[in-house]
Image (tube, rainbow, N blue to C red):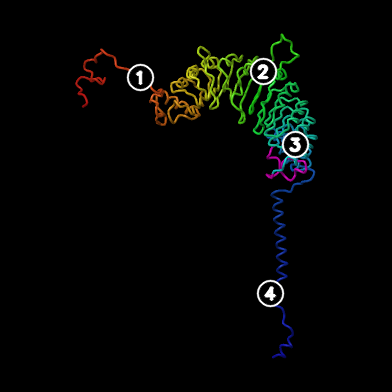
């Protein structure tokens, strides 16, 4: 048997091992054919486009693409839209570099990121990068594309703001609007920019240190300024900021909106030596809105007595007056203002600050509302403890356009609010913390229906929710002082009831027995 096996030779490999290379070759051919068929199908459904020198839409003229870009940047600004489309192709990159598209640039914390910032772009993924890595691309953009820039907004920058202001002053001769939101800027850099600024028309600054701003503007570098808003953010303690009022009025004759808040502003009487003695004192003849407010770090009493008279003399077209922290503003001072068509009057008083009550025989708040009740749209007297607020609210009638009324924290009663039922446009009534009103009503009421329900319930002596009045308050809504008793009206004596009328006052018909 061994000899027979040796004669047959060595054993042949199994049949499966001989077939395996052929199967692999056939499978490769099939996979390759499937890939080709799939590629052909995709090419038929979505044709291949060239990413070279031409755009993705070859039939679209460059003028139409430029118009599309202009419509896109009109609402949200040039950043980050133009930075992204400039990476699509060469044509779009050249179109995005047109200075006519870079009219509005808003650069904030959400745009400080991305790996392509190293290639002079200002947008990218959510990963934020510090401002020092964005500074050099921004300076290159200011030199090459900001020649027609009109509006620039910078938000949440803590460093290198002075270098940005220097670039704007050098490369942006048409800048009209500048806004710095919560930015850390050195006073010296801010003063150097305002010494020779572009022709600004709107200036909004929210920074910790704003001391050199108003003295620099009083020198007259921006005679065409129409909006000035200064908000000193927390983190800048120090002495009150100077307010050269007379010099500022002479340097800004076209100012329409003035907002000063967040800090103490100390008025300084600095008359201009160039004005003759016979000339009238300077003023803001075109001022329409004035807002003076104390911020978190400012104490009460920011607006002293006589400041409004100095600010608003010669301002007949004032429409809005908002004063926070001005508990020393008296009704007599308001009546001396030259404005005749005031639409917004906001004079809230912080808790703990006593408001100025009219003296005996003096001017009361009813004279203020009597003067402007035909034009007032919004009135805010929150926190004031004046006893004549009810008489002031009684001046409003059915022909008055009052829409918003805030009397939170005051001593108004249901009887004081009843005349407001005749105001047809009143849609917001804030009676929070009014201790003389029933429970369940001390909140802001928004909407015409909610205001009507409140006023009708108070006029009827009830509550729309059926709530009970506070302890010590009678059901009719009037308050009783300690030691006083409710007034009881005695019945008239000497008038006997009619014949056939029972003592309870009801009449009985003939032949009808009484109910037992």
Q: Earlier in the sequence, mark 1 or mark 4?
A: 4
Does dot 2 land on a helix, a strand or a loop? loop
Q: Position of residue 120 (x, y in %)?
A: 77, 41
Residue 110 falls inside the magenta stretch: yes
Residue 160's tag is 3
Q: Earlier in the sequence, mark 4 or mark 2?
A: 4
Q: Position of residue 401 (x, y in %)?
A: 53, 20
Please rate how many residues cluster around mark 1, counting C-alpha atoms within 10 Å: few if below 14, some from 14 to 19, many from 20: few
Residue 254's tag is none
Residue 487's tag is 1
Q: Position of residue 396 (x, y in %)?
A: 50, 18
Disc 4 to disc 3, C-alpha distance: 75 Å
The image quarter in which residue 225 lies: top right
Question: From which residue to which does the magenta span run?
Answer: 108-127
Which of discs 2 and 3 lies nearer the camera? The answer is 3
Does dot 4 land on a helix, a strand or a loop? helix
The image quarter in which residue 108 lies: top right
């Amino acid at each position: 048997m061994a000899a027979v096996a040796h004669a047959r030779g060595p054993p042949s490999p199994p049949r499966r091992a001989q077939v395996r290379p052929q199967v692999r070759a056939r499978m490769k051919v099939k996979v390759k054919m499937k890939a080709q068929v799939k590629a052909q199908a995709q090419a038929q459904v979505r044709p291949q486009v060239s990413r070279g020198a031409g755009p993705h839409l070859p039939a679209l003229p460059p003028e139409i693409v430029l118009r599309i870009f202009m419509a896109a940047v009109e609402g949200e600004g040039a950043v980050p839209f133009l930075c992204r489309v400039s990476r699509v192709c060469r044509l779009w990159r050249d179109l995005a570099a047109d200075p006519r598209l870079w009219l509005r640039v808003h650069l904030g914390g959400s745009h400080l990121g991305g790996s392509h910032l190293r290639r002079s772009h200002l947008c990218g993924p959510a990963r934020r990068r510090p401002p020092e890595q964005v500074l050099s691309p921004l300076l290159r953009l200011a030199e090459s594309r900001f020649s027609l820039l009109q509006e620039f907004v910078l938000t949440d920058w803590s460093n290198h703001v002075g270098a940005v202001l220097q670039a704007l002053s050098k490369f942006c001769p048409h800048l009209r609007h500048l806004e710095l939101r919560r930015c850390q800027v050195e006073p010296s850099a801010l003063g150097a920019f305002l010494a020779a600024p572009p022709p600004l028309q709107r200036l909004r600054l929210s920074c910790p240190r704003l001391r050199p701003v108003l003295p620099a503007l009083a020198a007259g570098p921006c005679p065409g300024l129409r909006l000035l808003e200064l908000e000193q953010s927390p983190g800048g303690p120090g002495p009150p900021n100077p307010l050269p009022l007379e010099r500022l009025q002479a340097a800004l004759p076209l100012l329409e909106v003035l907002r000063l808040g967040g800090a103490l502003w100390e008025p300084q009487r600095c008359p201009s030596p160039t004005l003759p003695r016979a000339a009238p004192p300077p003023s803001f003849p075109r001022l329409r809105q004035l807002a003076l407010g104390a911020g978190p770090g400012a104490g009460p009493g920011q607006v002293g007595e006589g400041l409004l008279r100095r600010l608003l003399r010669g301002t007949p077209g004032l429409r809005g007056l908002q004063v926070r922290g001005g508990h020393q503003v008296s009704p007599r001072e308001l009546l001396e203002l030259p404005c005749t068509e005031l639409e917004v009057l906001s004079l809230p008083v912080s808790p703990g600050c006593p408001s100025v009550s009219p003296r005996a025989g003096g001017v009361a708040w009813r004279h203020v509302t009597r003067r402007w009740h035909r034009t007032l749209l919004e009135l805010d007297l929150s926190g004031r403890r004046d006893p004549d607020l009810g008489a002031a609210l009684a001046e409003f009638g059915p022909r008055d356009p009052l829409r918003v009324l805030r009397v939170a924290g005051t001593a108004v009663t249901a009887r004081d609010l009843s005349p407001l039922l005749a105001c047809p446009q009143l849609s917001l009534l804030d009676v929070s913390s009014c201790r003389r009103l029933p429970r369940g009503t001390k909140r802001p009421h928004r909407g015409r229906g909610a205001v009507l329900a409140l006023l009708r319930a108070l006029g009827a002596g009830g509550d729309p929710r059926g709530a009970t009045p506070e302890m010590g308050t009678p059901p009719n809504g009037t308050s009783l002082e300690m030691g006083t008793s409710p007034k009881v009206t005695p019945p008239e004596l000497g008038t006997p009831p009619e014949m056939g009328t029972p003592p309870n006052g009801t009449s009985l018909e003939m032949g009808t027995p009484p109910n037992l």
